[in-house]
Image (spheres, grey):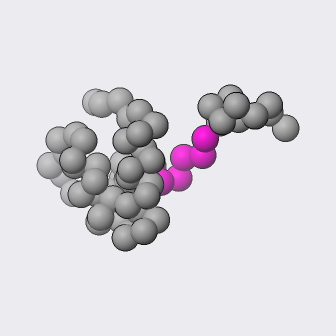
Amino acid sequence: MFVVDEVMAAAVRRAYDERGEWSAVAELRRHVCIDDNAEALRVVRTIASWCRSPEASGRPPA
Protein backbone atom coordinates (compact mmCIF):
# COMPACT_ATOMS: atom_id res chain seq x y z
CA MET A 1 0.00 0.00 0.00
CA PHE A 2 1.13 3.55 -0.66
CA VAL A 3 -0.20 7.10 -0.58
CA VAL A 4 -0.53 9.19 -3.73
CA ASP A 5 -0.09 12.91 -3.18
CA GLU A 6 -1.19 15.58 -5.66
CA VAL A 7 2.34 16.07 -7.03
CA MET A 8 2.72 12.37 -7.81
CA ALA A 9 -0.79 12.14 -9.26
CA ALA A 10 -0.15 15.16 -11.49
CA ALA A 11 3.09 13.65 -12.79
CA VAL A 12 1.37 10.35 -13.58
CA ARG A 13 -1.60 12.10 -15.26
CA ARG A 14 0.75 14.29 -17.31
CA ALA A 15 2.71 11.24 -18.53
CA TYR A 16 -0.54 9.44 -19.29
CA ASP A 17 -1.98 12.37 -21.26
CA GLU A 18 1.21 13.21 -23.16
CA ARG A 19 2.80 9.81 -23.81
CA GLY A 20 0.31 7.05 -22.93
CA GLU A 21 -0.30 4.37 -20.34
CA TRP A 22 3.12 2.72 -20.30
CA SER A 23 4.92 6.03 -19.88
CA ALA A 24 2.62 6.70 -16.94
CA VAL A 25 3.54 3.28 -15.53
CA ALA A 26 7.21 4.25 -15.76
CA GLU A 27 6.45 7.55 -14.00
CA LEU A 28 4.53 5.73 -11.27
CA ARG A 29 7.49 3.42 -10.76
CA ARG A 30 9.75 6.44 -10.22
CA HIS A 31 7.69 7.10 -7.07
CA VAL A 32 6.75 3.64 -5.76
CA CYS A 33 7.98 0.09 -6.15
CA ILE A 34 5.43 -1.96 -8.10
CA ASP A 35 6.82 -5.02 -9.87
CA ASP A 36 3.56 -6.36 -11.31
CA ASN A 37 2.75 -4.79 -14.70
CA ALA A 38 -0.98 -5.48 -14.43
CA GLU A 39 -1.17 -3.87 -10.98
CA ALA A 40 0.88 -0.85 -12.07
CA LEU A 41 -1.36 -0.36 -15.10
CA ARG A 42 -4.47 -0.62 -12.91
CA VAL A 43 -3.09 2.03 -10.55
CA VAL A 44 -2.18 4.33 -13.46
CA ARG A 45 -5.67 4.03 -14.94
CA THR A 46 -7.17 4.78 -11.53
CA ILE A 47 -5.00 7.88 -11.03
CA ALA A 48 -5.68 9.08 -14.59
CA SER A 49 -9.44 8.89 -13.99
CA TRP A 50 -9.38 11.00 -10.79
CA CYS A 51 -10.95 14.44 -10.83
CA ARG A 52 -9.98 17.10 -8.33
CA SER A 53 -12.66 17.83 -5.80
CA PRO A 54 -14.13 21.36 -5.64
CA GLU A 55 -12.70 21.70 -2.11
CA ALA A 56 -9.18 20.98 -3.38
CA SER A 57 -9.47 23.54 -6.14
CA GLY A 58 -10.79 26.23 -3.79
CA ARG A 59 -14.06 26.57 -5.67
CA PRO A 60 -17.40 26.12 -3.91
CA PRO A 61 -19.40 23.03 -4.88
CA ALA A 62 -21.97 23.51 -7.62
Quadrant of the frame with the C terminus: top right
Q: Find out whether residue 49 is within the magenta segment.
A: yes
Residue in the image at 35% along x and 30% along y: 3
Number of residue marks = 0
Residue 17 vs residue 40, the one in the foreground: 17
Q: Which residues are magenta?
A: 46-52
Q: Is residue 46 above or below residue 62?
A: below
Tell whether 45 sits left or right of 28. Answer: right
The image quadrant of residue 24 is: bottom left
Q: Position of residue 11 (x, y in %)?
A: 38, 50
At x 17%, y 41%, the residue is 33
- Is residue 53 found left or right of 23 in the rendered image? right
Magenta highlight on residue 32:
no
Q: Quadrant of residue 22?
A: bottom left
Q: From the viewer's perspective, is 58 left or right of 60?
A: left
In this view, which residue lies farthest toward the right? 62
Residue 20 in percent (x, y) is at 38, 69
Residue 57 appears at what percent x and percent y? Answer: 66, 36
- Would residue 23 be found to the left or right of residue 53 on screen? left
Quarter of the image with the N terminus in it: top left
Q: Residue 45: x, y in percent?
A: 43, 55
From where the camera sits, is residue 53 visible? yes
